Amino acid sequence: MEHIPVLLEEVILGLNPKPNENFIDCTVGLGGHSGEVLRRISPQGKLLGFDRDPVALKRAEQNLREYQGRFDLINDNYKNINKYGQYTAVLENNGILCDLGISSLQISGSDQRGFSFKEPEGLLDMRMDPRAELTAADVLNTYREEELTRILKEYGEERHSKLIACRVADIRKKQKFEKISDLLNVINEVYKGKPKPKKIHLATRTFQALRIEVNGELDNLKEFLPIGVSLMQSGARMAIISFHSLEDRIVKNFFRQESKDCICPPEVPMCRCGHKKSLKRITKKPIVPSEEEIALNPRARSAKLRIAEKI
Ligand SMILES: C[S@@+](CC[C@H](N)C(=O)[O-])C[C@H]1O[C@@H](n2cnc3c(N)ncnc32)[C@H](O)[C@@H]1O
């Protein structure tokens, strides 16, 4: 399986890594972006990398072996970055990257972790971190029907969220959801005789929604952003690639708020918040992949890159 890092050129242009600088990659994945950053911060620059997925980190370690000694990889949620203050790259970082979402290793289904509907016999797992408790099967078997509907609608923008949730609630009374095929059967049944999505698989939206819920993806991002900024020195940049409109909105609103001195509601005549700006927005509109990149790597199609600089 080939891995192509999304918006690589644009990320490198935005972060502008220079010899001997230090960087943090919050979502190392298979090390695509990390490798290019490490090459550019040679000969002495260091990279600190995080990933919740131990399988991805093993692969990244292999892929980055030519930079051995200049990177540390940590198997933890990036929102816990404050626990790792002993690493130079955290203390003196010149830039932070988050390439959110799921890696091509996870999408391909080759590691049987339940992220992919291409593996019908796989278990409904979807945990990026196998030590976490909640699985996709738990969500399907225990969440209230209304809550399931909300998740499928909000996180997946699934137009038949209500119908799918209703069928799930019905079926689980007789038999618990275990395998990917259990869920695929429901989705196929609900879509029978109805118009199908044109460019994506029937199950894409439902799988995306469950994955976001299982891994708490939106809350991780919200929690991390202010922590990340607090770790940056003046002039350091933060680059975030998101793949979902809700994630992009979190980044957009955070960058916008942090680039203003006062964040009082407009009806307040005099500033009472005392908020001071900490960021300068480098991208007011998100950078999106070119047609050529999407043709080469369809996974890039929904990517949006936003960059901000610490004041
Ligand atoms: C899109 S991939 C990154 C690909 C990487 N930039 C590359 O070029 O190889 C996203 C990665 O982030 C990881 N991830 C997602 N949420 C995370 C979190 N909260 N903490 C740490 N890693 C996370 C996933 O396990 C996945 O490997």
Image: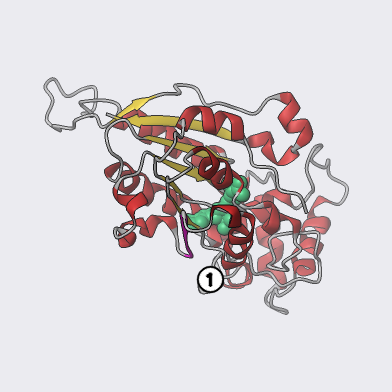
Quadrant in which the N terminus appears: bottom right
Tell me the colour scheme of the image.
secondary structure
Is residue 149 at least partly visible in the picture? no
Q: Is residue 36 visible?
A: yes
Q: Amino acid at mark 1?
A: Leu
79 or 264, nearer to the observer: 79
Q: Residue at horizontal 13%, vertical 20%?
A: 269
- Nearer to me, 187 or 47: 47
Q: Is residue 120 left or right of residue 171?
A: right
Image coordinates of residue 109 in percent, x first then y, are: 75, 61
Residue under the point 69% across and 43% down: 4
Q: Which residue is mark 1?
A: 134
Q: Residue furthest right?
A: 193
Tell me the quadrant of the picture where the C terminus can be found: top left
Q: Residues within 10 Å of mark 1 (few under 14, many from 20)?
A: some
- Residue at coordinates 60% horizontally, 27% vertically from top-left? 288
Residues shaded magenta: 71-75
272 vs 50: above or below? above
Q: Residue furthest front?
A: 43
Residue 182 sits in which quadrant?
Answer: bottom right
Please state the horizontal and vertical placement of residue 297, each as a whole percent of the image: 74, 38
Front-lying residue, 256 or 23 = 23
Q: Is residue 263 left or right of residue 151?
A: left
Q: Position of residue 34 (x, y in %)?
A: 54, 47
Query: Residue at 69% across / 35% down in the picture?
Result: 301
Magenta stretch, main secondary structure class: strand
Is 160 included in the stretch rendered in magenta?
A: no
Nearest the eye: 209 or 190: 209
- SS of the residue under disc 1: loop
Callout 1: CB less than 8 Å from ligand 1:
no
